[in-house]
Amino acid sequence: MSTRREFVVQSAAAASTLAFPLVAGAQPAPVKVGVLHPVTGALAYSGQQCRAGALMAIEDINKAGGIKSLGGAKIEALLADAQSQPQAGAAEVEKLNEAGASAVVGAFASAICLATTQAAAKYNLPHIVDVGVADQIVQRGLKNTFRFGPGYKAVADLAMVNLKVLNTISQSPAKTVMIIHEESLFGTGTANLLARELPGFGFEVKEVIKHANPTRDFNNIVLRMKSVNPDIVIPANYYNEYALLVRTMQQQRVVPKAIYSVLGGAASSYKFVQEFPDASNGIIDCNHWFNPKDPRAQALKKRAEAQKLFFSYELFMTYTSMMLLADALERAKSTDRAAIISALEQSTFSNHFMPYGPTKFVDGQNTGGRPLMTQVLDKDIKVIIPREYRQAEPMFPLKA
């Protein structure tokens, strides 16, 4: 692990801004924003997707005239790498603080976000959480921390209600569940919540299996799955492990009545669908997703694809989180951290393509944040629930 790293600064204007005082008509000093994600290590793909989303948003903000209430100040990205480790993420926050960041957007994984938000709180540094779903992130009373999307309890609650509905209207073919989860805060927290609550919805949880990050062989776990023979398999893991698990199930011809994901790392992924169309077919997921009827989302999707990027939840969640910060900066009319925090606390940000409505933060959580239910059908990802965003009828179960 490298102990000496430099922030990559998107704008070259910072040096001249520091060297010369502003005069009438001069470009105002840029607003420095930390863009903090795990762009190396086990979570590198997701971290790189997050970073791409942040930079696309910054490009759009700056092209539209920057932060107008600050005289058109541009946002300058201070790029930081959490290296897929919480302690490395916390160390990067220290550097971002020293570099004069006015706010931080990041840091994808729940365990990393838990560390980075805590580190940022020491300096009253505003931290917008883009993806991290562990509810502990917003349950510690940190005034600097704001999460735009839903946490795993809100996602899991909706997923369980919809699973019961799908099962009931299909004459209840599914009765047993097996949960397979990654070992960190996200996977363990999600799995524990599901295992505790699913019996109340009429499902017997036959087994809960934890795996390490990274895991490169799921043969033994899938052999165990064959033995247990659950009706439904619920994976809760990040992209690499999710994709390998489902591919191993396909190779061993394990076909449950449903692969029903809750925040599945690859379940709502165009990358997975493109690379493994047969293995991904029919997978249902309850996850972060955009309003498919909003033309802004479709335009950004085309733009990402033109850059050889997949339009993943990492990308569009970080994009909208950066837009949320820009809205707060406009209303704060300042780069002062306390002023930005105050603006976020009072946010009603609604100029976005997520299915959330106006933003309202309560104890750092956007109460409007909600997931959508998607399913891989005909080599595409379609919204199946709720009806207002529906693109296709659900296919459940996968086999009788």
Image: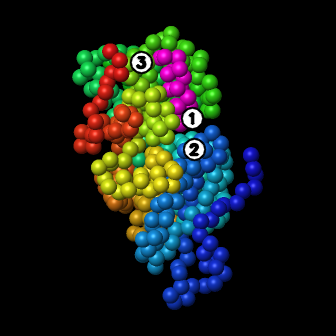
Segment tinted magenta in the rendering: 237-254
In the shown orientation, is residue 32 left or right of residue 389? right
Say which amino acid is labelled 2. Tyr
Say which amino acid is labelled 3. Pro
Looking at this view, is 299 or 80 the one in front?
299
Image position, residue 137 (x, y; %):
50, 44
Instruction: Report how far apart the C-alphas of labels 2 and 3 lie in the structure.
Output: 28 Å
Instruction: Report how far apart the C-alphas of labels 2 and 1 lie in the structure.
Output: 9 Å
Q: Please name the residue that numbered disc 3 is placed on.
A: 256
Extreme residue toward the bottom, this view: 24
Mark toward the start of the polypeptide (3 vs 1): 1
Q: Please name the residue that numbered disc 1 is placed on.
A: 240
Say which amino acid is labelled 1. Asn
Label 1 sits on a secondary structure element that is helix
The image quarter containing residue 61 is bottom left
Residue 59 in sight: yes
Label 2 sits on a secondary structure element that is helix
